[in-house]
Amino acid sequence: MTKFNPTIQIEQNLGKQIYDALQGAVVEAILKIARDGSGDEYWRSLMEGHCMKVEKDILPEFHALCHEVKDKLGFKEPVDFYVTGDSSINAFSVAAEDEGQPHIVNINSGLFDLMSQDELRFVIGHELGHIINKDTALKRLICFVFPPDRTLIPLTLQHKIRLHDQLAELVADRYGYLACGNLNACVTAFFKMASGLDLGKMNVSIDALLADNMKRLDYFLNDKGLNQYGHPVNPIRVQAINLFATCKSKKKLDEGMDELISILLKIGNSPIDEDMAVFIATAGLMVASIDGEVTEKELEHIIQSLSGLEIFPKIFLDTIVESDVEVQFKQSVENILNQDPSMRNPMLAYIIGLVMSDKEISPQEISFIYSFGEGVGLSHKEISVMIASLIQQHYTPSLASIC
């Protein structure tokens, strides 16, 4: 059994950053006063009215298993366990809003036909892990500040919430492993949930599953595959729990996890994404510095543009500042155009947009625009037409200039 702490530092840091950004302490204190009655009424009514509660005298064996897992994880707060008549291979947990009220863990009935006792321990431990890690509380705050289908979450925050959700799943998986202590059961549980197949009846070996998982993981490690889901893809989850269970040192575990987390940090899957991020940062810094002062508006424009490619745009920009900006700029332009010559117009448009972002357009900035445009093969006329078009569409003078 592993002795490693189940938490993941970057997940903890992200959770705090999101919570603080949404003024969590202030919002929660206000809601506690503003709310009438218990905040758990919806879920409590649903579970009590439509599901079977796991009571000792009704489901004694499963009741014992649930509380065995709870005790093994050292979780002292009250929890009500339920079973829902649902054939889908799924489970969920809901953290109590009010202190002293029981949390909720629900297991769909479809799991009982497919999972072994240890696999059920893993699933229950995973759901309790979400409660212990306080994932539900953060989700509740996000949904209040940004009601679904009503408010658009800023792009950078969207990416950070998605990354936090994925890392929280890996943390919950670790709690699931601690609950059952059986790596094979964790692995087979993943494959059963993915396929809906009883792998034991089909004589599938654990070695074959792990070998197959490594093949599929290579697909994501080699800069392929999309990573836009609330849960990490199963190849990542299986390898993450394998590392947690088998690594002999914290250093080896961290190295392996860093490689997996690098997949989660990817936003897109275009081969020019990395070069585009470098171009946006370096071109932004060069243009903003032309008049000798990088304004807040210009900096905000650069970071906003980077947020479509980098989860931590400010950190990325800081690393670029420490490098030879001009050399990186030239290399990124060359790399991008070698792969996709059609990008010259969007690249020029970005530079023009940055020039206009501080609502002032200097002769030196116009000179830079023409120099860059001609350098990527555009004519003087083509550049002039684009500048004129973007001024007409987006330029507004600053209030200071007309007051």
Image (cartoon, rainbow, N blue to C red):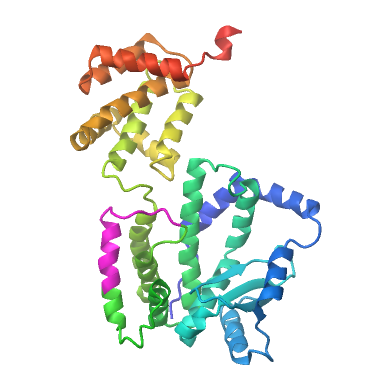
Residue at position x 67%, y 89% in the image: 56
- 138 above or below 85? above
Q: Which residue is at the front of the view, 195 or 63?
A: 195
Say if 401 sits above or below 269 in the image: above
| Quadrant (top left, top right, bottom left, bottom right) of the N terminus | bottom left
Give the residue at x 79% y 51%: 34
The residue shown at (59%, 56%) is 139
| Circle count | 0
Residue 209 shown left or right of residue 37 in the figure: left
Q: Position of residue 76 (x, y in %)?
A: 66, 76
- Which range is magenta? 212-229
Q: Quadrant of residue 354?
A: top left
Q: Is residue 6 visible?
A: no
Relative image position of residue 381 (x, y in whole percent): 26, 12
Q: Is residue 164 visible?
A: yes
Q: Is residue 84 above or below residue 203?
A: above
**Is 223 one of the magenta-colored residues?**
yes
Instruction: Indicate the position of residue 393 as horizontal and vertical percent values.
Output: 45, 19
Is 220 inside the magenta-drawn segment?
yes
| Picture quarter with the C terminus | top right
User: Residue 374 placed where, x, y %?
Assistant: 23, 18
Question: Farthest residue in the left direction?
Answer: 338
Left or right of 288: which side holds 21? Answer: right
